[in-house]
Image: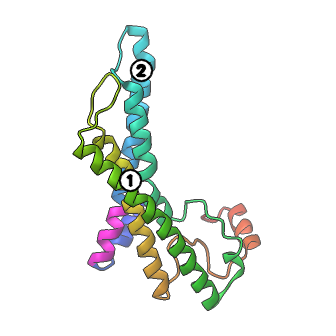
Amino acid sequence: MGIALAEDDVATQGPVRRALDLLYLGAGYAAGGFLVAIFAIMMVMSVGRQFALNIPAGDDFASWCMAAMAFLGLAHTFKRGEMIRVGLLLERLHGRTKQIAEVVALGIAAAFILYFTRHAVQMTYDSWRFNDVAQGVVALPLWIPQLGFAGGLVILSIALIDEMVNVIGGNRPSYEKGSPDETPEEFVERISQGGGG
């Protein structure tokens, strides 16, 4: 249902907003695809033992899929408000003060993620440039599995900058759920009565 709602939201917005939301949604779908791949690899490896069937470097492929899944899912998770955030201070602020605090928090987060993104992209580029290959049974070029890691960080960087621009423009952060004036007690009460999270 959440994906259907996201697709409806995308259809009613401008081209840049639509492209960004589709990027986050596509990364979320890719993360889901890697999760299914992990399941398939692990099941084939588990059941295959009974029939002397083995996937060469199956553990390597599962771990590469796990890294891609974790990093590609970050932007979608962040934009949907499902990422764990410590908002003890922000929850107590209101109005312009809260907006400024949100922008500062998003700016700090974007700076850290951009720092990590730069090094992840550099590492992936260096792996391609020096033709690094995996040391396991399958000599796969390392830049291929590293694309999921670096790509996920690039998309998360875009999402953080997108959100910061959104909040600077005076809009409510897309990751906030419930009404803007809802207290934590009201949130707990709404959830306990079956209201949406």
Q: Quadrant of residue 132?
A: top left
Query: Which residue is denoted by mark 2 in the rendering?
Result: 45
Residue 79 located left or right of residue 24: right
Residue 69, can we see it?
A: yes
- Position of residue 4 relative to residue 123, above or below, is below
Residue 153 located left or right of residue 138: right
Say which residue appears at 43% left-offset and 12% top-offset: 49
Q: Residue furthest front?
A: 130
Q: Residues within 10 Å of mark 1 (few under 14, many from 20)?
A: many
Residue 1, can we see it?
A: no
Asked whether 134 falls inside the magenta stretch, the response is: no
User: Main structural element of the magenta stretch: helix, strand or loop?
Assistant: helix
75 or 190: nearer the viewer:
75
The amino acid beneath tag 1 is Ala
Q: Which residues are magenta?
A: 15-24
Q: Residues within 10 Å of mark 2 (few under 14, many from 20)?
A: some
Say which residue appears at 62% left-offset and 84% top-offset: 98
The amino acid beneath tag 2 is Met
| Residue depth check, mark 2 versus mark 1: number of the one nearer the observer | 1
Query: Which residue is denoted by mark 1 in the rendering?
Result: 120
Q: Residue 182: percent from the left, percent from the top?
A: 68, 78
Q: Residue 178: percent from the left, percent from the top?
A: 61, 73
